[in-house]
Amino acid sequence: MRSKRYPLPARITLALVLVLITAAWNGVRVLAGLSLAPALHKYAPFPGPAYIAITGALSAGLGLAVTWAVLRRLRWAPQALLGVTIAYAAWSWADRIFLQPTAGTNWPFALLITVLLLSFVAAVTLDPRNRWYFGREAHEREEQDRRTA
């Protein structure tokens, strides 16, 4: 007997798209840090290409891990999604403030976008309507489906 397939809600899908875009962006950071190391070392001496590659790999890996957890509907996935999102935003702003020589004049816009995206992810992860999606582990849902079918 086939179990019912719980669809992925649109709001969770949008949050995952944001995570995957960020993971892809950080994948590009890894490739740039490795392939452009001589130029980055020459023109951007601090903190260097190793920092770019390592932080890109860490961020991309965390993004892919969170995506996997959400798609597997693991019980801890919403907390991981929110935690990784907050940590990434904090790291991004710390990097911008402490490591970039010129943070740019667009910081009010960047802050607004950060607050909006953090608010969206928090709303998605804390929304009680999403509890049914993450509420039980996959084997428990399949067992429940067999009993009700």
Image (cartoon, rainbow, N blue to C red):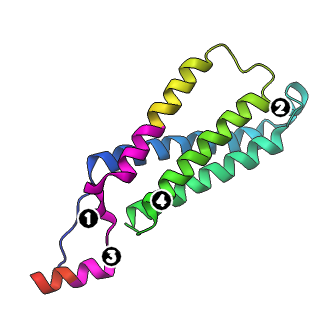
- Quarter of the picture containing the C terminus is bottom left
Q: Magenta segment, which residues?
A: 118-143
The answer to whether the residue labelled 2 contacts the one labelled 1, judged by CB atoms less than 8 Å apart, is no
Q: Which mark is residue 40?
A: 2
For marks 1 and 3 on the same chain, the one whose residue lies earlier in the sequence: 1
Residue 84 part of the magenta segment: no
The residue singled out by tag 3 in the image is: 138
- Quarter of the picture containing the N terminus is bottom left
Q: Amino acid at mark 1?
A: Trp
Q: Callout 4: helix, strand or loop? A: helix
The residue singled out by tag 1 in the image is: 132
As displayed, is residue 61 above or below residue 103? below
Residue beneath the point at 62% across and 20% down: 107
For marks 3 and 4 on the same chain, the one whose residue lies earlier in the sequence: 4
Disc 4: CA contacts within 10 A as few (<14), some (14-19) or many (>=20): some
The residue singled out by tag 4 in the image is: 79
In the rendering, at what x and y percent does residue 83 appear?
A: 54, 53
In the rendering, at what x and y percent does residue 129 appear?
A: 25, 55
For marks 2 and 1 on the same chain, the one whose residue lies earlier in the sequence: 2
